[in-house]
Amino acid sequence: MDIVQTIFIAIHILSMAAIVGGWFANFKNPTVTTSQWYGATFMIISGLVLFGLSEMGGGVEAAERIKLTIKLVLGIMVFITALLGRRKINRGEEVSTGLAHATGGTALVTALIATLWRF
């Protein structure tokens, strides 16, 4: 079971890197890239799988559930902003600066919460 969890942690980290890296790469000309869209999708899926694996492994404390709930809400926000950005690009419209920065900035905040919040 540890191997499965390690694989999903790697997917989760690579997904975050795709979102934040795409944001930094296009910082001067903000847009939502395809890699950010796929990163947001895989980030949500791998996060839910990791939560399920931790529940199967003995449960999660209340403080950790609060952290994971906040991360889930922020992850959904990243997914929605990436979805809206990709839909605009597919229609031939320009992605607003605020939407592009919301995608990358929210993902960065989520990564900071994941690494800095200790309980």
Image: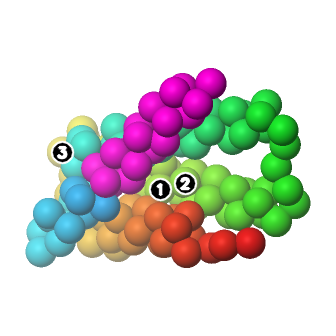
What range of the chain is rendered magenta?
1-19
How many neighbours does mark 1 have within 10 angstroms: few (below 14), some (14-19), or many (20 or more)?
A: many
Q: Which residue is mark 2?
A: 75
- Please determine whether, in this image, residue 17 is positioned above or below residue 40: below
Q: Which residue is mark 1?
A: 78
Identified by mark 3, the residue type is Gly
Identified by mark 1, the residue type is Val
Q: Which residue is mark 3?
A: 92
Q: What secondary structure is marked by label 3?
A: loop
- Please determine whether, in this image, residue 9 is positioned above or below residue 113: above
Q: What secondary structure is marked by label 1?
A: helix
Q: Earlier in the sequence, mark 3 or mark 2?
A: 2
For the residues labelled 3 and 2, say whether their Cβ atoms are less than 8 Å apart.
Answer: no
Question: Which quadrant of the figure has residue 81?
Answer: bottom left
> In this rendering, does residue 73 appear at all?
no
- What's the residue at 73%, 57% (across, down)? 69
For the residues labelled 1 and 2, say whether their Cβ atoms are less than 8 Å apart.
Answer: yes
Q: Quadrant of the C terminus?
A: bottom right
How many neighbours does mark 3 have within 10 angstroms: few (below 14), some (14-19), or many (20 or more)?
A: few
